[in-house]
Image: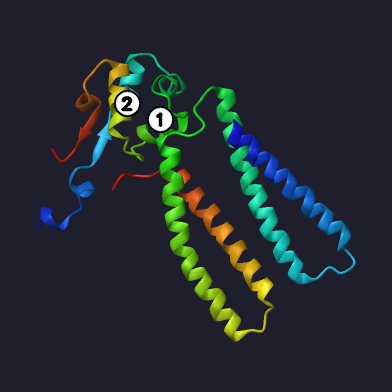
Amino acid sequence: MQFAGWCTISEVYAMTNRIKEYRARHDLTQDDLAKRVNVRRETIVFLEKNKYNPSLKLAHDIARTFGVKIEEVFIFEGE
Amino acid sequence: MKKTMIIFIVAAVILVTTGFWFFTSRSAFKPADLVMYGVIIVVVGFALFLGYKRLTSVKKGEPVEDELSKKVLQKTAALSYYISLYLWLAVMYVSDKRDYETHVLLAAGILGMAVVYAICWLVYNFRGVRND
């Protein structure tokens, strides 16, 4: 039995994303997406590997690039 | 770009000064001097690596710094500072037990800090930073 009060927020709400999927749909390379949202390519690589949680601004910029809402690209697994 | 040029200029000045120092003091070379050379090589090597990374980013048309790289630097600074406190404690312990000259201990401490910073940066840079 696990009590939510004993876990950190990041353990309860693990965030994943569908950047790779949307990137493929829009036929964009990691480099293209990085240039569009004004970050380095490494940042996109880390995002796709779920090794980095973006700021709200970056999440918004990425979602806007794909023409969808933030919650369609970034998914909170605990919800 | 300005910052990158400053990094390269400082690294070049340190290298030239070190070379000058090496050639003028070759006859009176002490093992303790190796520690100093170690400090300089690690610091200059790390600066050159960072400068090269920034330069390649500029050539690719990418921003030199973004939110991830800033976060990596912040986390690196915090962790390396924390580890450095224990490092200096170890240096103090060694200075009590062994009879080393002060400048050797200081050089060892600074070298240790540079190495710790470089290792922390590498770990965060390759492992990534999660917003916990």
Q: Do the numbered discs 1 and 2 sit on residues whose CB atoms are within 8 Å? A: yes
Q: Mark 1 lies on which chain?
A: A
Q: What residue type is labelled 2?
A: Ile
Mark number displayed over residue A19:
2
Q: Nearer the viewer, residue A74 or A40?
A: A40
| Protein image colouring | rainbow
Q: Residue furthest right?
A: B27
Q: What residue type is labelled 1?
A: Ile
User: Is B44 on the left-hand or right-hand side of A67?
Assistant: right
- State whether discs 1 and 2 lie on one chain: yes
Quick check: B75 above or below B91? above
Task: Give the class, few, some or many, for how many residues have Cα within 10 Å of label 1's Cα (few <14, many ≥20).
Answer: many
Residue bearing the label numbered 1: A44
Quick check: B31 above or below B49? below
Quick check: A46 above or below B116? above
For the residues marked 1 and 2, what is the alpha-carbon distance in whole angstroms?
9 Å
User: Is A27 on the left-hand or right-hand side of B42?
Assistant: left
Q: Where is residue A25 in the image (x, y as percent from the top left)?
A: 32, 15
User: Is B78 on the left-hand or right-hand side of B7?
Assistant: left
Q: Which of marks 1 and 2 is nearer the N terminus?
A: 2
